[in-house]
Image: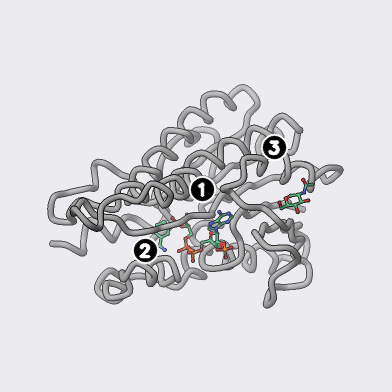
Amino acid sequence: MASVLVVGATRGLGAALVKEYASDPTAITYATTRSEGAPDGFPDNVKWLSGIDLTNQNVGDNLSSQLKGEKPLDVVIINAGRFMTEDFSESGGPNWNDELTMYTVSSIAPLFILHRLVHNDRLKAGSKIILVSSEAGSITLRHEKEGGGNYAHHASKAALNMVGKLLSIDLKEKGIIVSIVHPGFMRTEMTKGVGFDKHWDEGGAVAPEVAAKSLVEWTETLDISKSGEYWAPRGPHFATDLFE
Ligand SMILES: NC(=O)c1ccc[n+]([C@@H]2O[C@H](COP(=O)([O-])OP(=O)(O)OC[C@H]3O[C@@H](n4cnc5c(N)ncnc54)[C@H](OP(=O)(O)O)[C@@H]3O)[C@@H](O)[C@H]2O)c1
Ligand SMILES: *[C@@H]1O[C@H](CO)[C@@H](O)[C@H](O)[C@H]1NC(C)=O
């Protein structure tokens, strides 16, 4: 009986992951929401942890205390993310508070959550941590043709990649596996919200349910030999194909 936690589970990929895991009646599926109480439209067997906001510095303790007395987690997927656009122009340049939000959610809160989960024995040898990053955080895949801009969204994912690498080293002796992933280009509110829906067709964007299935399969086959590595279970798409 697998037990899984999806952090940032209300919409998009997170919601699809929760539904995928909860479709197995033997699985225990925990899911987080920022609001109080469970959101609508999910199977009854999902266990909601409420008031979990990754901009709150107590988020790790809060989450961990809501899991007190529960059995250790086999899988933790940190999926929450924010994308607010920025450019380098005089008037539309970087916004301090937007940057704080993006870096905090993407690359600071995950570490604090995992620190509390590990030290409160919510994870055990063989547990798998999946950090949902993005190919947007890859320096190698960034070329001039895609342009600059969107500093905090892209750079906060690059920072998350390093957090994952360092965590894999710190958690190695405990036998806890860390995988950093690009889930694929998806048709979600995130990409629509930044105007990327105009690239959905040519960029091969998939429904989040499709990417969720790939990520669940990826997680099943994962072992310690890949800990600390960055992978794209569905392959890269967006940056490589779209701007040729
Ligand atoms: N979509 C893509 O093409 C794509 C590509 C590469 C990587 N990714 C990554 O995949 C992940 C999911 O993306 P998506 O497209 O499904 O995004 P989405 O539709 O915008 O959903 C984002 C999720 O994160 C939660 N979240 C945002 N800020 C939060 C906070 N401060 N505290 C707690 N939860 C918070 C949201 O909760 P609320 O409902 O409360 O806002 C929502 O459940 C993100 O990490 C994203 O960067 C996406
Ligand atoms: C978690 O945070 C929420 C929102 O701030 C709060 O309502 C709740 O009491 C906190 N729970 C715990 C166990 O700290």
Task: Please provide percent x and percent y for residue 12.
Answer: 51, 67
Image vertical order of residue 113 relative to residue 28, above or below: above
The numbered dot on residue 105 is 1
Crowding at dot 3, Cα within 10 Å, few <14 / some 14-19 / many 20+, comes out as: many
Q: CA distance from mark 1 to mark 3?
A: 17 Å
- Give the quarter of the figure containing the C terminus: bottom left
Task: Please provide percent x and percent y for residue 111.
Answer: 56, 36
The numbered dot on residue 19 is none
Comparing 229 with 170, the one in front is 170
Identify the amino acid type marked 1.
Val
Identify the amino acid type marked 2.
Phe
Q: Residue at x 48, y 50 (%)?
A: 132
Q: Which residue is mark 2?
A: 185
Q: Residue at x 74, y 61 (%)?
A: 48
Query: Earlier along the polypeptide chain: callout 1 or callout 3?
Result: 1
Q: Residue at x 21, y 64 (%)?
A: 242
Task: Please provide percent x and percent y for residue 72.
Answer: 76, 41
Indicate yes or no: mark 1 CB to ligand 1 under 8 Å.
yes
Residue 188 falls in which quadrant of the image? bottom left
Left or right: where does residue 33 sit relative to residue 212? right
Query: Earlier along the polypeptide chain: callout 2 or callout 1?
Result: 1
Crowding at dot 2, Cα within 10 Å, few <14 / some 14-19 / many 20+, comes out as: many
